[in-house]
Amino acid sequence: MAAPVLILQEIDSTNAEARRRAEAGEFGPLWIAAQRQTEGRGRRGRVWEMPTGNLAQTLLLTLDKSPLDASQLTFVSALAVYDLVAHYVPPGLVSIKWPNDVLLDGRKVSGVLLESGSLGAGGLWVAIGIGVNLKAAPVSTERPATAIAEHLSADHLSPPDFETGAKHLAERFDHWLSVWQTQGFEPVRQAWIDRTPGLYGPCTARLTHETLHGTADGVEADGSLRLKLADGSIRIISAGDVFFGDNG
């Protein structure tokens, strides 16, 4: 059964609320969803805009795993968002860009931010923040963005409302979380690969202190990206902004 969903009218950030609850001794599992975020954040501290009607929610849970293993939940998140978006749009429009950006007709429709902290008795609390553009795309974005409402299939007259979207996402996340917990990362990785084009083509990786150009050469067993450089050497990319194709 999916974790319960707590729906709030307004919050600074669902991830921030999850952190506060974890530090106060509450470890879930609990989804925290907000109809409005005033200080939403993306990766590397970027602002995450949330137009009215879109979805922002964070799963707070406790894991008896290492931070490295817990990072695999970013792939679980991408699969859950993929399932949510694909339910409302025509087949073939949804894809995943390494590691967890879900694209709709080639444009970004969601974002994932995973944060964690150690527990006194061992293990981790983890906050998995997910934003999905249900009704509108933010206007000031680094990359082209879109929303489910712009690509509805003939079976849907409108995108899901906030509460429906929150519950649907929680259900799909619970499915992939169960796969991860009972079967390990490999089936999650394979499902993710099936939905992620561009893993064997031109690729640019913008890292903290350098930008690398080369050819994507698939992914490692832990989900890290293999990048083959012009001199034939291989770099393993575990985090960074990655662009596939010739326009990085």
Image (spheres, rainbow, N blue to C red):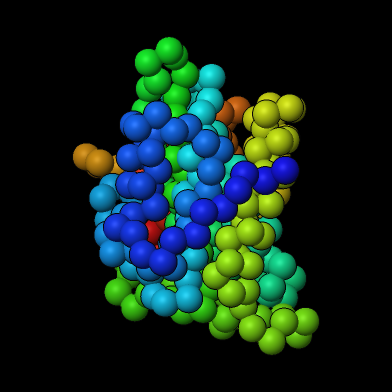
**Rendered location of residue 175, percent (x, y):** 72, 44
- Residue at 47 percent across and 51 percent down: it is 32
Q: Is residue 216 above or below residue 13?
A: above
Horizontal and vertical percent for residue 218? 58, 39
- Residue 124 placement (x, y as % from top left): 45, 24
Closest to the observer: 153 or 1? 1
Please tell me which residue lies in front, 211 or 233: 211
180 shown above or below 160: above
Q: Is residue 118 above or below residue 218?
A: above
Q: Residue furthest top?
A: 121
Q: Is residue 159 left or right of residue 143?
A: right
- Decide which of 22, 233 is in the foreground and name it: 22
Q: Quadrant of the C terminus?
A: bottom left
Q: Quadrant of the N terminus?
A: top right
| Residue 126 found in image quarter | top left
Q: Is residue 22 left or right of residue 132?
A: left
Residue shown at 34%/55% (left/top)?
13
Above or below, 127 against 32 in this view is above
